[in-house]
Image (spheres, rainbow, N blue to C red):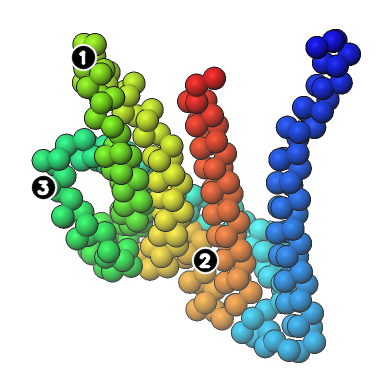
Amino acid sequence: MSASAVSTAQPAAKAVRRAPSLRAILTRAQGALVVVGLLLAWEASARAGLINVNLLPAPSAVLVALRDLWDAGMLVDDVTASVTRVAIGYAIAAALGVAGGLALGRSPLAARLLLPIIELVRPISVIAWIPIAILWFGLGDRPAWFLIALGAFFPIFTNAYDAARALPEIYTRVAQCFGAPRGLVIRKVLIPAATPQILTGLRIGLGAGWACVIAAELISATSGLGYMIQLARTTIEIEKVLAGMVIIGLIGFAMNGAMLALERFLVRGATPR
């Protein structure tokens, strides 16, 4: 192929590589337009009296509530308290869930002994654990850590367990035939093979933990977004309740996006080239 043909083909190849990202941008723009359209319809309905603003305030009233909370300094403090609780509880769940899932996935005996207990506890709602958490840990941060870790543990554990079980036995046997010790097999064979599914479990677990912190703060905390919503409910400030819900949704959306980006980065880095 001539040099001129190569130089002509290169811009075309770059355009092809840029096309998926352009489609992704257009897809996101469509979703954003739908959200904006719903907000405008909501605002117009409230201003026209089609909606009882005492029960469902207009988006403009929610924005005013957000500004008031920001000006009072309450919003930053409550967001910081909630995110800190999630970070601690989620770290506990991630450590126990990944290690436990991989261990039980590679040990049939341990799975037979412990999996029935895990499956028995898993269907119990985190809300049902709130009274016990308060009895065990009192009020404050510790019951929230416990509830977040409990809610985030099961998605992380399940994905790590399934990933470990799905690993073909031949992989570990080949490594052992070459004299690899057990620790090296875990680091170089098991964990890399299970990483994509573990990351999926970590992302789902983060969302579950973020939902659990709100439930915990509604009852057992004196700070955080859940406490802020509860306080606004008692004073019948519905616009502040909705403002708290908006912040919860935005932070959860950002967390999920960050985990998806981490998944793509790590999986791409682990893929042979």
N-term-proximal mark, 1 vs 3:
3
Residue at the disc numbered 1:
177
Residue type at tag 2: Met
Label 3 sits on a secondary structure element that is helix
Marks 1 and 3, how far apart at CA: 29 Å
Q: Is residue 170 left or right of residue 117?
A: right
Quadrant of residue 172 within the rendered picture: top left
Residue type at tag 1: Cys
Binning the other alpha carbons within 10 Å of mark 3 as few (below 14), some (14 to 19) or many (20 upward) gives: few
Label 1 sits on a secondary structure element that is helix
Identified at 71% across, 65% down, the residue is 35
Residue at the disc numbered 2:
228
- In percent of width and height, residue 107 lies at 16, 37
Residue at the disc numbered 3:
113
Q: Nearer the viewer, residue 181 or 15?
A: 15
Q: Nearer the viewer, residue 272 or 7?
A: 7
Q: Is residue 174 above or below residue 236?
A: above
In the image, which is nearer the foreground, mark 2 or mark 3?
3
* Count of numbered labels shown in the rendering: 3
Quadrant of residue 268 within the rendered picture: top right
Q: Is residue 87 left or right of residue 52?
A: left
**CB-based contact (under 8 Å), mark 1 and mark 2:** no
- In percent of width and height, residue 122 lies at 26, 59
Identified at 26% across, 17% down, the residue is 175
